[in-house]
Image: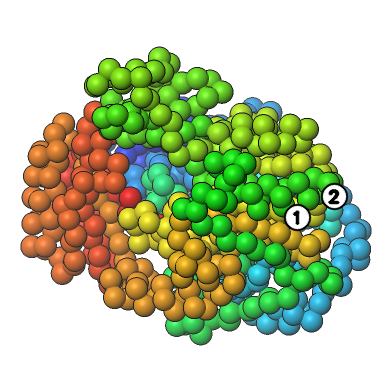
Amino acid sequence: MKYYFVWVRSNRYHSKEFLTYSSEEEISPGTIIEVELRKIDVLGFIISKTSKPRFTTKLIKKIYQLPPLPKNIIDLANWLKSYYPAPLGIVGQQFLPAKINSDFSDLIKVDFINTDSYNKQPTLNKEQKEAVNLMNNPGTFLLHGRTGSGKTRVYIEMTQKTLKEGRSVIILSPEIGLSSQLYDNFVEVFGDRVNIFHSQQTPKERLAAWLNCLCSLQPLVIIGPRSALFSPLGNIGLLIIDEAHDQAYKQEQLPHYHAVRVASVITQFNKAKLILGSATPLVSDYYLAKNKNRPIIELKNLAIKNNFIDPDIKIVDLKDKSHFSRSSIISDSLIDFINESLSNKEQSLLFLNRRGTSRLILCENCGWEALCPNCNLPLIYHGDMHQLRCHTCGYLQKNIPSICQICDKDSIIYTTAGTKAVFEEVKKIFPNANIKRFDTDNQKADSIGQLYRYVLSGEVDILIGTQQLTKGFDLPKLSTVGILQADSNLYIPDYSSEERSFQLITQVLGRISRGHREGKAVIQTHYPNNEIIKAAINNDYSSFYEKEINNRYDFKLPPFYNILKLTCQRASSKSAESVCSLLKSNILKKYKVIVEGPAPSFHERYKEKYKWQLVVKSTKRKDLTDIIEILPTGWTYDIDPVSLL
């Protein structure tokens, strides 16, 4: 009998030690197997051989006749569990599918059909050629290209070069809809060598893509969200993170990894190239590139040559009601621009980062507000379903109040419009237009990912949505953009709020700055003279960066300090504060770190419990991982959080 350390894939296994199983067969490291864990069969892979333990072991139930996981993947798994501490079984979920069907061999492709359309790609312009020439050696490259500058064309060129070297390519996008757009672009050139991963695939489709990565003897192109980083490819030559600034690249659940950091480690393990592409790079990424003398490659010119002038951008003061004679939500200037686009058979896009019909339901007489009984947060009114919903815990209330529960007056009002209210308003103003709303309340069939080709065709006249619509979509027929409340994120009490606001405004305006046609934009704001809004309108990343990086330094924030957010939930606010104070005292006795708090979380109540938090800062990241190891039960943590809310 032979004995092996096994890395299991199961969120039921919370230890950080490998399990030991036995087999009569000789099994190599990386081999994918099936074992019994607490009476349930789960997948795992062999780490190494070991000596006979003192305890009785279970037999390995099944050895899959598949190539073993490549060594670089096992090295990545070991790095991940130490850099982003998490139970072994949860880390294992990143690297193996949930299940391998008995007929898995039918899912594996052997031959690939390449298209011959590479020569049909637009000729690289001068800036794009220079960018490609600068990316000859392994390492990280920050591709800072304005919207419409042709970053995707550079990606295709670099992919072509990498495949010719016999090496695979991984391309990440933050949204499923963008994955579909990239997939179309790359399939046109590289045929069925391109595989896509995303959460809306069936288990069979995801398994087929995973098996092709593991079994292919030819280089592949993998496209997907952050989880595509863990594709079992053995010879990776290029990683591309498109829209690299996006918060979707941070995993909110265990393990709390950031895709950019993981990609940089894959780059090192494979001696590969990493391209971080964005019109609005993260301040931390930009600082690290400058500080470590990594190339910052700028694309300042539009890829499509045109004679159009810069977009006509109007700023409308929301405090001045004279701008809203025809609608309380949409300014007169914006209505005129939309009418002009409709008459020219062009598209318009209205951006509002709020879902629902109304954000606040309150009594005009006494100030009573409709709040979630579990979280004490405002309930959001959804007019299409005529119900109140908590967007934090999911609580639903179907009886909509018409009389105040406190003063018994008929004075209930609905304030602060969401995307559903905007949709209803736009239908009234433009009754003959084809209007579509895109936000996370959409059903799968109505998502931007599913309807992207329909939108691209120009069949939709007016698009309404949240930040889903800001992320790199190329809509050639789009001519008008309206930002209905540009400062909605600006004064959220979080260190990243100004950066997020700059990115969102820049990205929204970027939908009409791509060279296809003349563009018009209206920015509605309560603060027309705000520096962040002005910098975004002027596409002035430099002045924004200098202001933001100085603030980060002054307040000991990333990239100068590592951050760990610790959260506890208790039945009372006093109890939560007390355990926070105790933990803070214990941390400060053992580590030379900064601990801020205790303080209530931004959403203080969740499912009838009170949430309090501590924020730990240190220039030594190991201090933070060590603190995670000693956390008492009942605490949750997020290392390298993109937000402290």
Residue at 35%, 72% (x, y): give it. 552
Image quadrant in which you'd find residue 11: top left
**Looking at the image, is mark 2 or mark 1 earlier in the sequence?**
2
Q: Position of residue 324 (x, y in %)?
A: 57, 46
Q: Secondary structure at mark 2?
A: loop
Looking at the image, how many numbered discs can be counted on the residues? 2
Number of the front mark, 2 or 1: 2
**In the foreground, 186 or 374:** 374
**In the foreground, 196 or 504:** 504
List the single residue furthest toward the top: 399
Q: Secondary structure at mark 1?
A: strand
Instruction: Return the residue at label 1.
Output: 479
**In the foreground, 565 or 59:** 565
Image: 41 above or below 307 = above
Disc sitting over residue 344 in the figure:
2
Residue type marked 1: Ser
Asked if residue 330 can be seen in this view, the reply is: yes
In the rendered structure, are the residues bearing label 2 and label 1 in contact, judged by CB atoms less than 8 Å apart? Answer: yes
Q: Position of residue 390 (x, y in %)?
A: 39, 30
Q: Position of residue 203 (x, y in %)?
A: 62, 31
Residue at 36%, 24% (x, y): give it. 411
